[in-house]
Amino acid sequence: MLRPVPSRTQTRWAAVCGLVAGAAGIGISDLAAWLAAPAGSPLAAVGSVIIDLLPAGMVNFGKDYLGTADKPILLAIVALGVIALAAFGGIAELRRKGAGAAVFALVAVVGLVAVAIGSGSDVAAYVPTVVGLLLAFMLLSSLITRLRRWQPARAALRPDGPADPARRGFLVATSVFGVLAAAAVVGGRVLVGAANRVSAARSGIRLPTPATPAPAVPAGADLAIADLSPYLTPNEDFYRIDTALQVPVIDPAKWSVRVVGMVEQEVSLTFEELLGLPLVEHVATLTCVSNEVGGNLVGNATWLGYPIRELLARAKPLAGADMVLSRSEDGFTAGTPLDALTDPDRQSLLAVGMNGEPLPLEHGFPVRMVVPGLYGYVSATKWVVELKVTTFAEDEGYWTPLGWSARGPIKLASRIDVPGGEAPVGTVAVAGVAWAQHTGIGGVEVKIDGGDWNRAELAETTGPDTWRQWRYAWDAPAGDHELTVRATDADGTLQDPAEAAPAPNGASGYHSVRVTVR
Ligand SMILES: Nc1nc2c(c(=O)[nH]1)N[C@H]1C(S)=C(S)[C@@H](COP(=O)(O)O)O[C@H]1N2
Ligand SMILES: [Mo]
């Protein structure tokens, strides 16, 4: 079939369509990266790969002559390259349906390869490129369809004929989407750029040596059984719970926390001042009130921070105050009993470090609270910016009006991690973790089917604020079995067997697993 050869005007407009769609793709992928996966910006990923491929001499030349503008300039060059290819894709799409899609897909593949080089196994990092590609192509094909309808080739034959509604439709759509695409490019860059700058600032932080180091983790704290939760939870495996749609991006140079409310003296502290104070290191197990029996919204880390009691001592709480309402940069609040924060025997920290690194962005960078013994929703405010000394009568934390208790001490709990669903006949290691933060675990027992409770062996710990691993050597006979665990705290209190859902103040009941032995 013969296709009409597009006129030059039409070809030019097709290039404009490609350009608009390409820009939209870049902008949308950056916005998606900002929302979902900051490492997933294809533009930034391609930029990083180019920097890695360039000879060091050239990179340094760029730094010397362009200063900190080197990266924005590189990204602008990459973006222009993408847009030029997209313009070509527009022309290709006009000539032959689907040809533009091929050009766009090719550009996206380059982006995906760059993302793969940068952040490998993180699946979320690929989403922004794919979303950008799909939207860019949808836009391109819709603009090209309008362009075909307009047929400037024919319109050009009668330049002063009646206004062509198809022409108007095409021009309006192209300019509206052109403006939106430009806004997306600028907005996406600004937002992702801010996230990347803060990540870079975080990488540049050297945490001070603690004035009070945590006790060394005893070798016997980790039984090193396959699939048993490690004593210390690596940051990348640490559970994450928050109300933030978007991880707050806070420049540490601009961060400060203020102590206000029922105090003699308002106090404020910058990040630099905080790092200059004598910091304490403390190992503590964080737990979410939403954790189901046997669930994994619990993790153990070495925290580095400044005791909140010291900060409160400077502010001098007034008589009558019984709560501190901590507020995060994104508006979350937690109501913590004042005495849990002033207690000289409880290491409640304004934490800056987690397992030897600055806090990861999603775990509260630059500063969060950690209070041993209390569920996160009433104590562990991430991205904390204000501590208001107040009363339970006067104020309530974010979750309290939504049906959760105002006070949230962590319930004594235990969990079976291994074996999974199956085990071989013979001696099987049954193992897990148990926690009773701030009291400590005194014992763990395991029951097989309807039998007696058997005492498990307890691993060591750095102190009462962390979970404890436990194991029990089970002589497993063939068949289907049910294993159940229960713990006793260091005061001799037995774990509550009554089954309760997480709301309003934490789940209770014993964890059981079914195992098939053969
Ligand atoms: N700013 C902020 N801090 C927050 C929350 C939140 O939603 N926003 N959630 C809390 C809850 S419910 C828990 S269990 C802990 C979880 O901390 P993590 O995500 O570092 O594990 O953070 C607490 N701090
Ligand atoms: Mo939580």
Image (cartoon, helix red, strand yellow):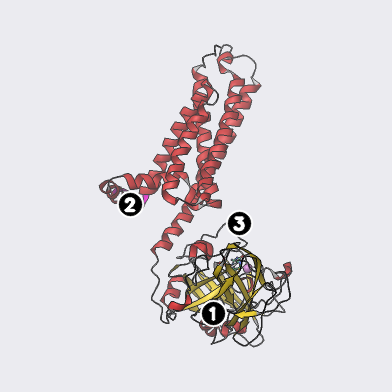
Q: Say which of 430 and 284 sits in front.
A: 430
The residue that mark 1 highlights is 457
Q: Which mark is residue 245?
A: 3
Residue ID at (48%, 78%): 282
* Mark before the other along the chain sequence, 3 or 2: 2
Disc 3/disc 2 C-alpha distance (Å): 34 Å
Q: Quadrant of residue 176?
A: top right
User: Is disc 1's CB within 8 Å of ligand 1?
Assistant: no
**Residue 259: x, y in percent?**
56, 77
Q: Which mark is residue 62?
A: none
Badge 3 amino acid: Leu
Q: Is residue 255 above or below residue 124?
A: below
Label 2 crowd bin: few (<14), some (14–19), many (20+), radius 10 Å: few
User: Which quadrant is the N terminus positioned in?
Assistant: top right
State yes or no: discs 3 and 1 in contact (Cβ < 8 Å). Answer: no
Badge 2 amino acid: Gly
The residue that mark 2 highlights is 67
Label 3 crowd bin: few (<14), some (14–19), many (20+), radius 10 Å: few
Q: Which residues are magenta?
A: 65-69
